[in-house]
Amino acid sequence: MNRERLKGHLDLLLLSVLTAGSAHGYAIISELRRRSEGTFDLPEGTVYPALHRLEDAGLLSSSWVMADGRRRRVYALTAPGAAALAAEQTEYRHFTHGIQAVLGWSA
Amino acid sequence: MSATDGGTVEQYLDQLYGRLRCAPRDARRILAEAEDHLREAVTDGLAAGLTQQEAEEQAVSSFGSVRAVVRAHDGGIWRLPGRAVLFDLALAGLKLGGIGALAVGASGLLAAAMNLLLGPGFVGGTGRGVTYPAASCRWWLADNPGVHSCARAAVLENSIDAVSLRLAVGVLGLILLLCYYVAPRRRSRHVLPDGFVPTIAVSLFGAAGAGLALLAASGGPGISVVGPGWYLSGALVALVMAAAFALQLNRTLLRRAHG
């Protein structure tokens, strides 16, 4: 998939992955790849700035934990993050509905 | 994983550290997350049957090139609100302005020392061949009651101005630096690269020092109106400041190169 197109939806996807519970970067990215069945395959290191930006915006929180003898940053969805995700999902649903209607794919 | 010091992951982290342009705390976080990610990816690769080397290469490849990762983080910096950039530029301007004005004040002290040791003509000029406006002469002669020649009064006035006016600028520099130190610097997002202020300072002080030294050595324009000490006092201070900032810049670059 076109990477630039994916970047436009990355925030929505990251917030969505974290609804299952808090996770560290590697787990989030692995889950993103697993759920998309390999379609969303960004360079993994470029996902972290998006996580940092979502945290700066208050949509995620993060904290250090120790795992396997090294520090690990674990991210969690905040209440504003959950609200933003719900709003984004609604907007995206309307958007895709409109696209499908134009393309003639609506049921 | 048990990456050796020269392993692919270690080399990648070294390169990433060398290329990151952000606040130290942000850099440590980015590196810690990258290392945790890469080590976990290597562990998964080993579990899938890859050799250590293959697992490290695959982990690094999937993580993305250092350039792409740095660009992604830089993109984060430049998406910051413009006021964060303006705030840091204003802080740098306060610091540079304060130090520059303080240097002018220091050159005033040097001019005072030259006046004492070499006489007022070294800084104030000879006054020979200069025609002064009558109104200025009256003013200078009134300021120097024991002097009867306009040229001599002008020389004394110049030599004193070189000290008093520059010291006044120096006091302004102290005020600017005071503002810099009381400014809420914790609000800074460190968007300017390390070595930004020293680089600007070396350039400005170096250019000023070289220019003033040339004027002092060549008897530049107005040399009869003011003496060589007028320029030399400024040149010496500017060159010393340029050397000091060059050392600071060198330390910054070495620290960055060696981690």
Image (cartoon, rainbow, N blue to C red):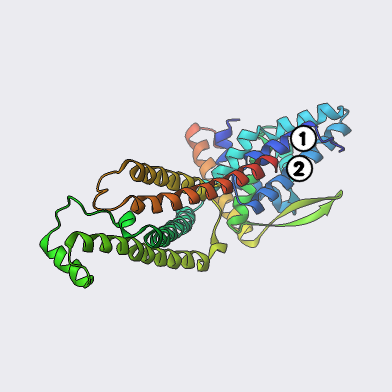
Marks 1 and 2, how far apart in space? 8 Å
Q: Which residue is mark 1?
A: B9
Q: A16 or B7, which lies in front? A: B7
* Image position of B192 with respect to B57: above or below: below
Can see residue A93? no
* Kind of residue at disc 1: Val
Of residues A78 and B65, the one drawn nearer to the viewer in this rendering? B65
Label 2 marks a residue whose chain is B
Name the side, left or right, on which B16 lies relative to B120. Answer: right
Q: Quadrant of residue B111?
A: bottom left
Q: Residue B171 placed where, x, y %?
A: 41, 67
* Residue at 77%, 29% in the rendered image: B58
| Residue B107 x, y percent position in the rendering | 41, 57
On the image, which quarter does residue B12 sit in? top right
For marks 1 and 2 on the same chain, the one whose residue lies earlier in the sequence? 1
Measured as percent of width and height from the top left, residue A87 is found at: 56, 54
Helix, strand or loop under label 2:
helix
In the rendered structure, the answer to whether residue B8 lies left or right of residue B172 reads right
| Chain bearing mark 1 | B
x 82%, y 26%: residue: B54
Residue at the spot x=54%, y=33% of the render? A105
Residue A61 bears which disc, if any? none
* Residue sitting at x 79%, y 37%: B41
Q: Which residue is mark 2?
A: B35
For this rendering, which residue is in front, B35 or B206? Answer: B206
Q: For the N terminus of chain B, which image quadrant? A: top right
Whether tag 1 and tag 2 are in contact, CB under 8 A, the answer is yes
B153 lies above or below B250: below
Left or right, residue B186 beside residue B124: right
Is residue A69 shown to the viewer in this render?
Answer: yes
Residue B114 position in % (x across, y down):
39, 58
Check disc 2: other Cα within 10 Å, few if <14, some if 14-19, many if 20+: some
